[in-house]
Structures are given as structure tokens and as C-alpha cells.
Image: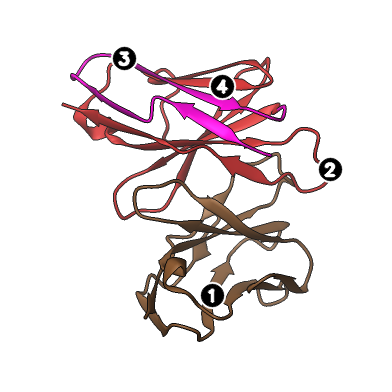
Amino acid sequence: QKEVEQNSGPLSVPEGAIASLNCTYSDRGSQSFFWYRQYSGKSPELIMSIYSNGDKEDGRFTAQLNKASQYVSLLIRDSQPSDSATYLCAETSGGGADGLTFGKGTHLIIQP
Amino acid sequence: GAVVSQHPSRVICKSGTSVKIECRSLDFQATTMFWYRQFPKQSLMLMATSNEGSKATYEQGVEKDKFLINHASLTLSTLTVTSAHPEDSSFYICSARDSGARGHGTQYFGPGTRLLVL
């Protein structure tokens, strides 16, 4: 059974600092990786997707993928209080035809 | 773009009744939609994959006769919780994959339906 592991936190980061979120996955056949942000009581919102080894940057967000180590990370630069949420790591091996396997999420708190 | 809607957003029903939840892709076609369930303080768990014009594929442990899925068009999938019981109370979230998108098929999530069975 595929597993996605995340530290549940809470992870507390001062405003303006870099927040670093980590995720490991068990299935070496996983092809696509996603980071979603979920506010309490709301559905997940896509932040980043990454498919190839290396870094992918989008604004204040950088996703990093290392398939050899089965490791995915998300960096949030210049953290804002509005970034406080639960961040879900997800993967799929079917190129989009399969559903996502989610980690339990990391609760991030940005301290003003 | 890539907007997915769900209806209703919240429903309260009595034990034993059936509840239908609609999931629509508003600005793209989706041959594949997915239904997830999230219990309090838990992550999303995939329940089933809904394929337009064919039977849904259910994850292990999900009763197909209890959770009826219909995907009659490229923009609409429905989930019916039959004979709902209090343990079915949860946050049900659908997602849709853009059929026209090449490559990895990012999933876009609807706003979710919170079901409370009394």
C-alpha cells in the first residue's frame, strides 16, 4: 500500500522567514507530486506540482523533488500570516489517471 | 479557469435517508473525476474514481452499493450516499482532471460537501 509521510507539526515560523515542509513517499513508481494548502473547514487548494528531479519555483514557493531519495519538499519564502494552514503532500503514479494519495499534512503557523 | 463546483455545500439528514452530492467541472471537460472523504483531523482518502460513461472504480474498503457514483456527462459526476448512518458523517470532496490537459493531469478540487447524519 502506498504511503506518503509528513510531520504533522505544528511547525511554527516567524513572519518573513522561510518555511520548510518535507514529505517522503513509499512508491518508487510515483510519477507526479503535488503540494496543496488546506485552510480549516475548506477543500485543498493546489500550490505546486512537480514531476522531475530538481527545483521548481513559482513566486514565493519552491518545490524540490529527489526521486532517488523518494523525497519532496516545499519552501515558502517571506512567510506571511496568511500562509498559516495545513499543507498536504500528494502523489500519483498514473500520470493523472489515478487518484491522489495524500499525506496527513503539516500544520504550519506563521507567527506575526 | 479550472473551477469545480459541488452542491450542496452542507447537508444534515436523518439516519436511513439517502443523500446525493453533485460535482461539476465548470470550464473544462473531465472524463475522470475523483471522490474523496476527509474525517476530522485526518487527511483526504480516495473513495472512488468516476469515469464518464463507465462504472466507477472503488478503493478497497469502500462499499459500492452504499456509495453510488454516476458520471453521465463530461462535466458532472454524482455521489449518492444510500441509507446514511452517523458514521458516514464526513467532509466529501470531489476533484476533476482536465481531459484536455496534456501530461500529468492536475486535479482540481471542489469546495466540498459537509454531511452530518443524525
Q: Quadrant of the C terminus of chain B?
A: top left
The amino acid at mark 4 is Ser
Tag 1 and tag 3, C-beta contact below 8 Å: no
Q: Chain of mark 1?
A: A
Residue at horizontal 23 percent and vertical 34 percent from the top: B87
The amino acid at mark 3 is Ser
Tell if the residue under mark 1 belongs to the same chain as the one under mark 3: no
Measured in 3D between alpha carbons, the distance from the residue under mark 3 to the one under mark 2, in whole angstroms, is: 37 Å
Residue A108 x/y as whole percent: 41, 72
Give the residue number, with chain letter if any, for mark 1: A22
Give the residue number, with chain letter if any, for mark 3: B18
B21 over A1 or under it: above or below: above
Question: Going from the N terminus, do you reach mark 3 or mark 4 first?
Answer: 3
Residue A11 picture quarter: bottom left
Could one spot residue B38 in this view of the protein? yes
Part of the protein shown in magenta: B1-29
